[in-house]
Amino acid sequence: MLTDSNAKTHLADSMAIEFQHDLEKDNLPQAEIEKRVKKSRERITSAPVVIILCVEMSEMDEYPDAQRKNAEYLIATQSVANAGMQLLLAAHAEGLGSVWVCSPMFAQEAVQNALNISKSWEPQAMFLIGHPVEIPEPRQRKALKEIVQINSEGVKFL
């Protein structure tokens, strides 16, 4: 968890380098690259709290075959995602605003180096948490019958 402005700036700067390289590979105009990188940096540095969730496999089961190794990695990744969702729900329950950002997946080494964490910790997600400037109106939700079909064969999600 980062709350120190210097630490957040260091993380944002490290990730910005990787983000810029990726956008350059996409052949975006330089002005667009600068705009996106600036926005990314500002989101990180302006958040009161930044949390990075990582997958770490040392406590997971080890298997000799690729199929089960892959399944175990997927289980660990799902566990991290579930923890992240619980974190977002807890923040909301406390009246905080939060956003889940997956950009650390694209800059894992930069995040590891910026935070001085072990290479065995694979950054998966970043949470930006704070008090919301404004609370938007809830979005209109689709009716259940628009997204789920129930018949004699069971439930089908549309």
Image (spheres, rainbow, N blue to C red):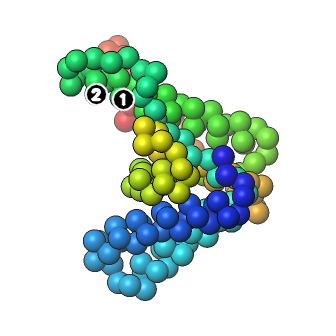
Position of 6 with respect to 13 (left or right) is right
Residue 152 on image: x %, y %: 35, 13
From where the camera sits, is residue 108 visible?
yes
From where the camera sits, is residue 40 visible?
no
Q: Are marks 1 and 2 in contact (CB under 8 Å)?
A: yes
Q: Please identify the quarter of the rendering in which residue 30 is found.
A: bottom left
Q: How many marks?
A: 2
Q: Is residue 47 above or below residue 23?
A: above
Which residue lies under the disc numbered 1? 74
Q: Quadrant of the C terminus?
A: top left
* Distance CA(mark 1)–CA(mark 2): 6 Å
Residue 149 on image: x %, y %: 40, 27
Position of 8 with respect to 147 (left or right) is right
Q: Is residue 118 above or below residue 9?
A: above
Give SS at disc 1: helix
Which residue lies under the disc numbered 2? 70
Q: Residue at x 48, y 42 (%)?
A: 118
Residue 141 on image: x %, y %: 57, 44
User: Which amino acid, mark 2?
Assistant: Asn
Check disc 1: other Cα within 10 Å, few if <14, some if 14-19, many if 20+: few
Check disc 2: other Cα within 10 Å, few if <14, some if 14-19, many if 20+: few
Q: Residue at x 49, y 79 (%)?
A: 35
Q: Residue at x 64, y 41 (%)?
A: 88
Give SS at disc 2: helix
**Viewer-closest of 61 and 99:** 61
Residue with the most extreme top position: 152
User: Which amino acid, mark 1?
Assistant: Leu
Q: Residue at x 67, y 64 (%)?
A: 6
Q: Is residue 44 above or below residue 112?
A: below
Q: Is residue 105 above or below residue 11?
A: above
**Viewer-closest of 100 and 144:** 100
Q: Please identify the quarter of the rendering in which residue 20 is found.
A: bottom left
